[in-house]
Image: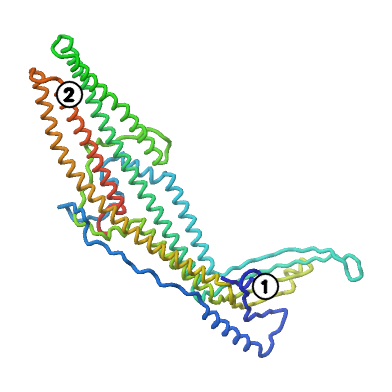
Amino acid sequence: MTSAGRKPGDGHAAPHAVAEAWGNERESVPGSGRPVRIFALALIMLVAGCAAKVGPAPQASLTMPAEWRAAIGPGDAARPMERLWWRAFGDPALTALVESALERNGDLLVARARVADYRARTDLARAGQQPAVNVDAAPVRTRALAYNGAPHVTNLFQAEFQASYEIDVWGRLASLTGAARAAYAAEQASADAAALSVAASVASGYLNLRGLDAQLELTQATLKLRGQSRELARRQFEVGYSSRLEWLQAQAEYEAAAEQVPQLQRQIFEQENALSILCGGNPGAIARGRALSELSPPPVPAGLPSDLLLRRPDIARAGRALAAAGATLAATHDQLLPSFRLTAQGGVQSTVFHELLSDPARLWRLAGVVAAPLFDGGRTQAQTDSAAALRDQAFHAYENSVRAALAETDNGLGAILRLREQAERNDARRETAAETLRIARNRYRNGYASYLEELDAQRTLYNADVQRLQLKTRVLVASVDLYRALGGGWGGQ
C-alpha cells in the first residue's frame, strides 16, 4: 500500500498529493480547490478501473456421511462431551500424568508462546486502524559563520508533535486486522490440537506401559512354573523314568521364558523414560495406578453424528486459516485503491529557553493526502494472484482435514469393533488351550504320553495369555485413538 510519506523515484509508484494546506508557510490561492477536486476525482476513477482481478473461489466437493462404516452398538445415546476425557478410564495415576503433561510438556510451552506472539500481531494490526501521535522535544546549539565572517552561536529550543490517521475507506486495514485475528484463532486451535495430541500420547503410553507390566507378571509366573516342570523332568530323568531329551526340552522352555524377562524389562524402562519426557520431566520411573485387568475402555454410544468432527482442533485450525487467507486476499486486492491520510503537525520554537513556555513562536501544519499507484508493472496483480492461490490452498487443506478426520474416526470405530471380536476368539482359544494343557499333564503323569506333549500345551496356553493381554491393551489404546479422532470425546455440544 502506498503512503503519503513516499517520494517519486523511491522504487514505488508515485503518490499524488491532492490537497495540502500549510498554516504558516503559504496562503490558499483563490479558485485553486476546483482543479484539485477534479484531479482527485479523475485519479479515483482511473485507479478504480485498474483494480486487480480476483479469480473465482473453488467449489466445495465435501459431503458428510450419514453414518459410519463401522457401527458399534447397541449402546447408549451420545452423551455430552467430557473434556477431561482421560478421567473416563478411572485411573488416578493416568489422570495425574496427563494433567502434568498438559502443564509442563515442552512442545505445549512452545505452542503457547506462539499463541502469545500471534496475539501481539493482532494488536499490531489493530493499531494500524488507530491514529498515531508522536511528541519530540530537543534543544539545538549551533556555531556558524555570520555574513561578516565572524563566528556566531545560536541556541534553538523547540517542541513539536505529529499526528497521522489513515481513513479506511475501502476496508483494507479492517481486512488486515481480520486476517490477523483469524491467524491468531488458527494458532490457538493449533495449540489445542497439540494439547489433544500430547494428552492422547500420554494416555496411550501409560496404557501400553500397564500392558507391558501385565506381560512381565505373566512371564515371571510362567517362568516359575516352567522351573518347577524342569526340576520334575530332571528328577524323572535321574531315576530313569524319562529320557534325557525330555529333560533338555524342559530346560530349553525354561530358558525361553527367562529370555523374555529382560526384554520386557527393557521395554518398560524405555516406555517410562518416554512418558517422563512427555510430561516435561527428566527420564525416570512412572507411578502406577490400576492394573491392566482393572482397566476397561469407556463405552462407545451408538449413532455418533459425523458433525462431531467439526470441533476437532485441527479442523478448526484449517477453517480459521481459510478465513485468514480470505481476509489477506481482500486486503491485497485493495492495494490499487487510493489511500486517504490526514496529518497534523504543530510545535513551538524559541531561541531563549524561558521564552519556550511563555512566548514562543508557534508553528503548525495540516494536510490531507490521497495517494494511489498509477503503474507498478503488474506487482499488485501478481500479489493478488498469489493471495488467491493461498486462499485456494487453505480451502482444499480444510476439506482434506475433514476427510482425514472422517477416516480416522471410522478407523477408530472399526478397530474397536474388530478388536472386540478378536478378543472373543482369543477367549475361546485360551479356554481350549487350558483344557488341552490339563489333559496333557494328566496323560504325562499317568504315563500315557511324553513330556513333550505337556510342553507344547504350555507354549500354546502361554501364547494365548500373551495375546489376550495385548488385545486388552490394544482395545484401551483404540479407545484413546477414538477420543483423539473425535476431538476429545463424543456428545452434543
User: Residue 49 location in percent, x, y?
Assistant: 52, 81
Say few, some or many: other residues with alpha carbon within 10 Å of mark 1 (under 14 / 14 to 19 / 20 or more): some
- 188 or 263: which is nearer to us? 263
- 304 or 384: which is nearer to us? 384
On screen, residue 83 versus residue 351, left or right, reads left
Q: Which amino acid, by three-letter code, is at mark 1?
A: Gly
Q: Quadrant of residue 253?
A: top left
User: Residue 273 location in percent, x, y?
Assistant: 38, 35
User: Residue 444 location in percent, x, y?
Assistant: 11, 20
Question: Going 54% across and 67% down the picture, which residue do you hit?
Answer: 128
Q: CB of mark 2 within 8 Å of CB of mark 1?
A: no
On screen, residue 366 versus residue 386, left or right, reads right
* Numbered mark located on residue 245 in the image: none
For numbered disc 1, what is the local secondary structure? strand
Tell me the quarter of the image containing the N terminus.
bottom right
* Numbered mark located on residue 455 in the image: 2
Tell me the quarter of the image containing the C terminus.
bottom left
Q: Which residue is most to the bottom?
A: 31
Say few, some or many: other residues with alpha carbon within 10 Å of mark 2 (under 14 / 14 to 19 / 20 or more): many
- 344 or 484: which is nearer to us? 484
Q: Which amino acid, by three-letter code, is at mark 2?
A: Leu
Question: Going 18% across and 9% down the picture, which residue do you hit?
Answer: 238
On screen, residue 372 versus residue 111, left or right, reads right
Where 142 falls versus 421 (above or below)?
below
Residue underneath mark 1: 346
